[in-house]
Image (cartoon, grey):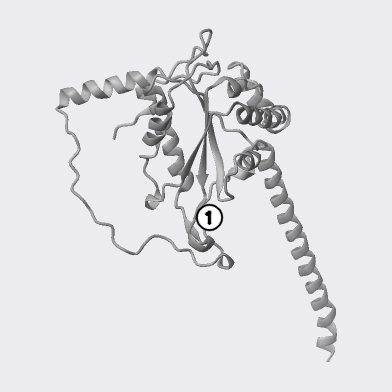
Amino acid sequence: MAIFSFLSPVFIAVICLLIVFILQNKRGNEKVKKGKEKINKESRPWVDEDLQDSTELPAEEDGKDEGMDEEDISHVPFSPLRYDPQDMVKRSKEFYETLNQRRSVRFISNETVPREVIDNIIRAAGTSPSGAHTEPWTFVVVQDPEVKHRIREIIEEEEEINYRKRMGDKWVTDLKRLRTNWVKEYLDTAPYLILIFKQVYGILSSDRKKTHYYNEISVSIACGILLAAIQHAGLVTVTTTPLNCGPRLRVLLERPVNEKLLMLLPVGYPSKDATVPDLKRKPLEDIMVVI
């Protein structure tokens, strides 16, 4: 009994020390976690929460994901045009030279562009590959002057906040040499605005959801093809990602909740007094590695 009476205070002391250690360790972990969250928030103050990349899987309460049709898709012969090596070199060089003239142009004329041209360049974008061939894109073409102006008001309102608060001093400083700001006159003057929405999931019968795999990557590839098609048609644009404008623009354009704005392209001819920064592109050896 004497031994137990001696051990009891020691045992209690050990337990107390363990409790103190556990509590301090927990507090330390919380501080580290908060510190990381603070660093992430400070280093990326401009992040648009509405555009976080993810493949949204339907929750159980949303009902069964219908997915793809189980029926096998028939395959057909594929016989693309084949060019001789010299012609391939010529064609690839010509295509490069066409795209190398592409510039981001912020001075766009209000000159009319044939609507059929817009239809064709969006058809070209629609040839893009997509995860499981879900084609998770919607191209909204705006030509109505009043709607274009409302879009400009929404974007300029948010962009001013982005420049003054969200983007941070470094980003704003880096943009100064390009002479950009939150004023977007081209949103009024361009004859067409193309707003590209990614469908984070599909909506099928009975409001059931359909998974759209790699939706953001798929739509981004389509945007690249669209840019090439715009250049090939002899038109100009500037790639804009209206940070924190997506929900308001989605509501304005009456798009469903499964769509999120990824990019906006004003499309038209350059204005007569248009200028662009005198930028140089990296040489081939700086962007390609051959193994």
Indicate the amino acid at tag 1.
Glu
Q: Nearer the viewer, residue 117 or 208?
A: 117
Q: Secondary structure at mark 1?
A: loop
Horizontal placement of 118 versus 160: left or right? Answer: left
Please state the horizontal and vertical placement of residue 72, each as a whole percent of the image. 28, 61
Placement of 51 over or under 93, stated as above or below: below
Sort mark 1 into few (<14), some (14-19) or many (20+) by Cα contacts within 10 Å. some
User: Can you give x and y, in whole percent of width and height, for residue 277 in the image?
Assistant: 52, 13
The quadrant the C terminus occupies is top left
Residue 15 falls in which quadrant of the image?
bottom right
Residue 273 is situated, as x and y percent measured from the top left of the image, at 53, 7
Q: Residue at x 74, y 65 (%)?
A: 22
Task: Kindly identify which residue carries mark 1.
Answer: 56
Pick the front one: 236 or 33:
236
Rendered view: 29 above or below 290:
below
Q: Residue at x 45, y 49 (%)?
A: 214
Give me the residue at 42% from left, 25% from top: 230
Residue furthest out toward the left: 84
Q: Position of residue 247 (x, y in %)?
A: 64, 42
Residue 143 vs residue 13, the one in the foreground = 143
Among all residues in the image, which is located at the extreme top? 273
> In the rendered view, does 223 fall on the left or right side of 142?
left
For this orientation, the residue located farthest to the bottom is 1
Q: How many numbered marks are there?
A: 1
Lateral position of residue 79 relative to residue 205, left or right = left
Height in image: 291 above or below 205? above
The N terminus, quarter of image: bottom right
Q: Quadrant of residue 217?
A: top left
Residue ID at (51%, 18%): 105
